[in-house]
Amino acid sequence: QIQLQQSGPGLVKPSQTLSLTCGISGDSVSSNNAAWNWIRQSPSRGLEWLGRTYHKARYYSDYSESVKSRITINPDTSKNQFSLQLSSVTPEDTAVYYCARSPVSKAGLLHIWGPFDNWGQGTLVTVSS
Amino acid sequence: DIVLTQSPDSLAVSLGERATINCKSSQNVLYSSNNKNYLAWYQQKPGQPPQLLIYWASTRESGVPDRFRGSGSGTDFTLTISSLQAEDVAVYYCHQYHSTPRTFGQGTKVEIK
């Protein structure tokens, strides 16, 4: 059974960096069969995918253009977890942040990406001074 | 970016009656190489993360009751709850995983009439 456990502060000051961690049990951040994602949810923006990291011979990261200049998602193989860092936050970054797993399979040369099948519990992050 | 538009935004259905939610995609999410629609449905209850119900447009996730049915192809999709139960009160989202950025519909709130 795969479980994702989020940790990190719930209050961040404007202009500072939001940092969250997602611990993985029942799977591996080094797996070639999964991607590890960050998603946020707010009343104004709905559910918004922020980015992912995944391993295929080496680690890759993809980011949404909306946050690309401010975001870093990194794997931590020693702790089997991955992290989110979002810099220069403003009150518009206030949201519930989720980590989530998406499976990847292979059919010949085709990589078949799947939906988000396991989610963390969510962390409400408020950006306020 | 692929835009997903759900309709209606909310609906109230009597217990035991059918609930139907539509999701229209701005682009085709059918991948010709494997003939799969990269469209999923989630259920979200207050204070909880979204829970995967349906993937590949019509495949139920393990443990999901068979009153939940997904259908459609290409750009038009439907989630049907055949006989609404009290525990189905929630917000439902469609989601495309055909392209990055991954995107979601705006959600449909289902309530009991």
Image (cartoon, coloured by chain):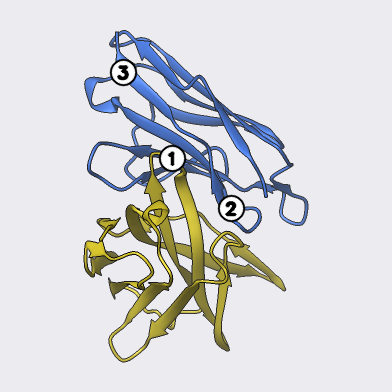
Chain colours: A yellow, B blue
Classify 10 Å Cα crowding around label 2: few (below 14), some (14-19), many (20 and above).
many
- Do marks 3 and 2 both belong to one polypeptide chain? yes
Residue B31 to residue B79: above or below: below
Secondary element at image label 2 = loop
Amino acid carrying label 1: it is: Ser
Q: Quadrant of residue B47?
A: top left
Secondary element at image label 1 = loop
Determine which residue is flagged by label 1.
A44
Per the rendering, the mark at residue A69 is none
Q: Quadrant of residue B24?
A: top right
Q: CA distance from mark 3 to mark 2?
A: 27 Å
Q: Position of residue A41 (x, y in %)?
A: 39, 48
Left/right of residue B11 with respect to residue B24 in the rendered view: left
Left/right of residue A74 with respect to residue B78 in the rendered view: left
Amino acid carrying label 3: it is: Glu
Q: Chain of mark 3?
A: B
Rendered residue at 35%/45% (across/down): B50
Q: CA distance from mark 3 to mark 1?
A: 22 Å
Left/right of residue B4 with respect to residue B44 in the rendered view: right
Secondary element at image label 3 = strand
Q: Is residue A119 visible?
A: yes
Amino acid carrying label 2: it is: Tyr
Determine which residue is flagged by label 2.
B97
Classify 10 Å Cα crowding around label 3: few (below 14), some (14-19), many (20 and above).
some
Rendered residue at 32%/43% (across/down): B63
Determine which residue is flagged by label 3.
B111
Question: Mark 3 or mark 1, which is nearer to you?
Answer: 1
